[in-house]
Image (tube, grey):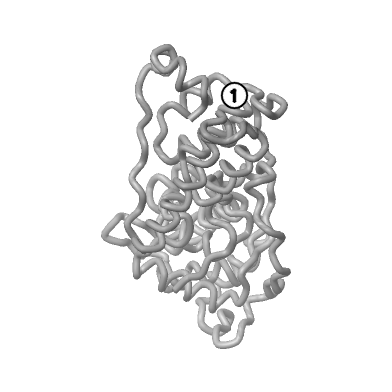
Amino acid sequence: MLRLIHCCRPLFMILLGSAFVWPTWAQDGATNTDTRASRALDLRQQAVAYENGEGVPRKPELAISLYCKAAVLGDPQAHYSLGWIYANGRGVPRDDATAAYFFRLAAAQGLDAALRMLKIVGEPGNNVPECLRPPAPAPQPALPETGQEPGVNYQAVAPRKIFELVMKMAPQYQVQPQLALAIIAAESNFDSQALSPKNAQGLMQLIPETSQRFQVRNPFDAAQNIRGGLAYLRWLLAYFEGDIALVAAAYNAGEGKVERYKGVPPYRETRAYVQRILRTVGALAHPFDASVTRPSPALALIRPPWRVN
């Protein structure tokens, strides 16, 4: 950690009120996870040495670069150290918005100290710090404009009323009809009275919390249910910046699980669900309205692109 923390540890701990709480790494794909964790630890230790001149010449710029490489690998302590560097202007101009971005990433992984620092530096900005930005993605094919897709012609298989409702309402929520119809088919098979053991209700299987969130009074009413599901899809598309696989995974398992596993969760049901949606939609990317919500802070950790096995 920083020299300031080493030399003034008692005062530092008093100011924070408690010791750091480091999160537990996910155990799925243990070999890969352990390799990433080991690599991140090595990079962070090098960064600490160059930041404080411990056995090597003090090089703040190199330290920041090494912290960034560890941060890309998902190391929460590296996120915290970068937040501290920007919050205090150590080797870089002070930038509270950038500091808050890193603190928020650390807080999302369980660092209580980062939560406390967020109260000091304020809200993060909208811009992803440069060292966390992924390479520019390759252009993705545009989604079809209609519900016609090879192998899945929803106009032929969906009840006429539901198909017409989706075709009318989906554009109002900036959601391609094919994606909405694919979700309905996967969730309820077009049964407006469907009820799951987890109390997911109606065509788009809205749980009560989602119905309340998007002001759906009667989830078994087809129009209301579709409206709520489309509102949620529009939010997810903005939150995951149009990545259809992440949106589908979040719709099935929750956005928190996608962030926790830094991609599609390892659940068999969720992975099969995502594959089904991707095959039906026929594209990986979807247009999104960035004004709906800020993107997930975990996107910097999820990218570069991953695969659904």
Q: Position of residue 89 (x, y in %)?
A: 66, 24
Q: Position of residue 7 (x, y in %)?
A: 46, 17
Picture quarter with the C terminus = bottom left
Q: Is residue 219 visible?
A: no
Q: Position of residue 288 (x, y in %)?
A: 67, 56
The residue at the point 52 percent across, 41 percent down is 46
The residue at the point 41 percent across, 69 percent down is 271
Closer to us: 253 or 108: 108
Q: Which residue is mark 1?
A: 122
Closer to us: 192 or 236: 236
Residue at the bottom extreme? 151
Say above or below: 297 vs 195: above
Closer to us: 84 or 146: 84
Say above or below: 40 vs 149: above
Answer with left or right where residue 291 lies relative to residue 186: right
Density class for disc 1 (Cα within 10 Å; few <14, some 14-19, many ≥20) is few
The residue at the point 61 percent across, 30 percent down is 99
Q: Quadrant of residue 64?
A: top right
Could you tell me the amino acid type at mark 1? Answer: Gly
Say above or below: 309 vs 240: below
Q: Is residue 56 visible?
A: yes
Closer to us: 205 or 276: 276
Answer with left or right where residue 207 lies relative to residue 56: left
Q: Quadrant of residue 150?
A: bottom right
The residue at the point 42 percent across, 18 percent down is 9
Kind of element beneath mark 1:
loop
